[in-house]
Image (tube, rainbow, N blue to C red):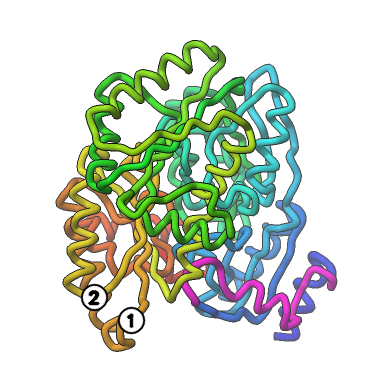
Amino acid sequence: MTSHINYFQSVIGSERVLIDEENLIRCASDHTEDFVFKPQIVLQPETTEEISRILKYCNQNKIIITPRGAGTGLSGGALPIFGSAVLDMKRMNKILKIDTENFQVTTESGVITEELQNAVKEFGLYYPVDPASKGSCFIGGNVAENSGGARAVKYGVVKDYVLNLEVVLPNGEIIWTGANTLKNSTGYNLTQLLVGSEGTLGVITKIVLKLLPHPNHDLLILVPFYSAQEACRAVNKIFLAGFTPSALEFMERDAILASQKFLDNYSIELPEDIQAHLLIEVNGNDQEVLMREMEGIVTVLEQFKTDEILFADTEKTKEDLWKLRRVTGEAAKRSSIYKEEDTVVPRAKLPELLAKVKKLGTEYGFDSICYGHAGDGNLHVNIIKNNMSDQSWNNKLPEAIRKLFVYTKELEGTISGEHGIGYVQKSYMDIAFSKIELDLMRKIKAVFDPNHILNPGKIFD
């Protein structure tokens, strides 16, 4: 261990080679349940060249190393499950170039997503991918997990904006995966292979993102439903009527209650018979066009039984409503021991998925708080332990989760929409993929990382 520490100190300096208890504990967990895996050492590089030397050394000496972003992940992708070393990317935090002529930004991977959004907004540009943790998560982690967020329904997810990546391979070699062009049909698409690879194939150091013109206006409404199933059914009706909201979020009653308690803010009235809400946003550059679009959406909603619709007529109201939605996951976790599933189906099948969750809860004795990106069929299911026995929680619940994932696949969906597989979902990959498909993935991993030193034990064993 001493010789390894001496080498790392020679590369990045002793002040960035951390073995103190505080930093080891900080890097021992992320936002995934209550898992803790303490590493032996934390390394904080500042340049691609430093990462190259670190990985080359680790590869030669068979030292396992786990890349880490901000630690906001929900599938255990950044957990150092074998201990060993953590590659902490927090110092790779510079926005390198905002190209206003070509609508692109080049950034290091440790930049906080919201800070990136604010920086390009100053130039009238827009990076629309906005995960709930955008105020703390790193853009590199977003790329590694192919993150989505509330506005994916209109604008897509991370993969739709990544043009090019600088990546350090496990053997220390540095490559660029693509080109800074809007079209690229040159060979295999290594860029998209690295997007969503969860730090198992290489360490992403620089990212070139496509940008859009920033929309000048947005409108937001909160729609209360007497039935959660009806709220889910209304989603597809809005699209069938020809409207594409910039966000269309679903929150069942318990989700709103948890958020209100978490924020200690009860400004939104919640009558006893209201079971769910839809949060619907439209954005663009013409206020009159947006008003007509929102009026059209409200007309569609008239065929469902809803309570009075809240129109967010001030920026403060908009901020409050979005905050209520964005803290839902964190609020649900505060209420009890939990497991979060990230199911996604074709959006017309969302009512069936929600019904299955509740049916399984009755069958296995668990409670659930459901919310998510209804516009793209992505339902986050927070399974709450509450009064379940430890034996049922540990032994019976995995059976229920497997049934949920099997049903999700039968609905032509899959087991993760935006959180990734990481550590916690890898035992269910046989539901999503055949043996042949999984073998192909393992062979790809072996080509990139034959010594299995880079984030092993994630996605599959």
Quadrant for residue 377, please give it. Answer: top left
Per the rendered image, the range of residues in magenta is: 14-34
Above or below — where is 278 with respect to 55?
above
Other residues around mark 1 within 10 Å, as few (<14) / some (14–19) / many (≥20): few
Residue 339 has which mark? none
In the image, residue 99 lies at what x, y percent?
A: 70, 24
Image quarter hosting the N terminus: bottom right
Above or below — where is 248 with respect to 381?
above
Q: Secondary structure at mark 1?
A: loop
Badge 2 amino acid: Gly
Q: Which residue is mark 2?
A: 365
Q: Earlier in the sequence, mark 1 or mark 2?
A: 2
Question: As drawn, is 68 to the left or to the right of 77?
Answer: right
Badge 1 amino acid: Asn
Nearest to the observer: residue 21 or residue 367 = 367
Question: As drawn, is 74 to the left or to the right of 438?
Answer: right
**Residue at (24%, 45%) from the top-left corner?**
350
Residue 387 has which mark? 1
Question: As drawn, is 331 to the left or to the right of 436?
Answer: right
- Asked if the residues shown at circle 1 and circle 2 are in contact, with their CB atoms under 8 angstroms apart, the answer is yes
From this viewpoint, is residue 110 visible? yes
